[in-house]
Image: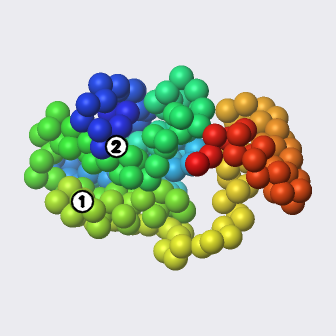
């Protein structure tokens, strides 16, 4: 994948992990693509008793699961520094998915097959946004438990962020929590110049 889909001058690419299950596929069947979210992709996605597997068997679908950039084994940059995290966005993830699907179609002769994207929670929102942004690529979307309304104080998501930080580096979330606490103290003490200098704010 391109590191930055929105900068044609950026020459950097990265490897994105994906999984395939073709056992149910019948010629001309649909292509089901499970979009990854805020965690690693998992073989349990292909476990029995899942709706997507039931439908894949019913409709003769080819199954793909695509890992989200910066999660699991998909590391677009050497580290998760602030400078590098600018490439972690839903917009970039949607472009990743579009490129992936169109590449799979071209490589396997699936251009005339129907494409349905799937997701749950954050990736459910991605699936719905994907269908809106790429109606020429996806014929449908299934967004299970997908957030529809923007939430200002979405504290539940911070639990996911904490778990993700600790997966990258054990104990990282405690350090981040301490840093925010120190920053809050500086704000309460009106140490604006020190904050500006520390974070190079404008």
Position of residue 83 measured from the top left corner of the image (x, y, whole percent): 54, 34
Q: Which mark is residue 96?
A: 2
User: What element does badge 1 sit on?
Assistant: loop
The residue nearer to you, when weighing 108 against 54, is 108
Mark nearer the N terminus (1 vs 2): 2
Q: CA distance from mark 1 to mark 2?
A: 12 Å
Is residue 137 depicted above or below 86 in this figure?
below
- Number of other residues with Cα within 10 Å of mark 1, as a class: few under 14, some 14 to 19, many 20 or more: some
Query: Does residue 159 appear anywhere in the picture?
Result: yes
Residue farthest along the front direction in this orientation: 193
Q: Is residue 186 left or right of residue 115?
A: right
Q: Residue at x 58, y 48 (%)?
A: 202
Identify the residue position indicated by label 1 in the image: 134
- Number of other residues with Cα within 10 Å of mark 2, as a class: few under 14, some 14 to 19, many 20 or more: many
Q: Residue at x 29, y 38 (%)?
A: 7
The residue nearer to you, when weighing 145 against 76, is 76
Position of residue 84 measured from the top left corner of the image (x, y, whole percent): 52, 34
């Amino acid at each position: 994948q391109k590191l930055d889909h929105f900068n044609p001058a950026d020459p950097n690419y990265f490897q994105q992990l994906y999984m395939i299950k073709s056992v149910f596929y019948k010629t001309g069947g649909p292509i089901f693509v499970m979009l990854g979210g805020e965690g690693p992709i998992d073989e349990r996605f292909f476990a029995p008793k899942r709706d997507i597997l039931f439908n894949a068997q019913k409709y003769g679908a080819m199954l793909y699961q695509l890992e989200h950039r910066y999660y699991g084994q998909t590391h677009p940059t050497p580290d998760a520094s602030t400078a590098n995290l600018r490439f972690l966005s839903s917009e970039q993830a949607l472009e990743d998915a579009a490129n992936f699907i169109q590449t799979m179609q071209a490589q396997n002769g699936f251009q005339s097959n129907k494409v349905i994207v799937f997701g749950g929670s954050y990736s459910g929102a991605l699936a719905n946004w994907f269908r809106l942004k790429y109606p020429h690529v996806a014929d449908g979307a299934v967004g299970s438990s997908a957030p529809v309304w923007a939430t200002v104080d979405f504290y539940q998501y911070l639990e996911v962020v904490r778990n993700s930080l600790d997966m990258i580096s054990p104990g990282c979330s405690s350090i981040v929590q301490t840093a925010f606490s120190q920053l809050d103290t500086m704000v309460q003490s009106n140490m604006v110049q020190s904050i500006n200098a520390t974070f190079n704010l404008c």
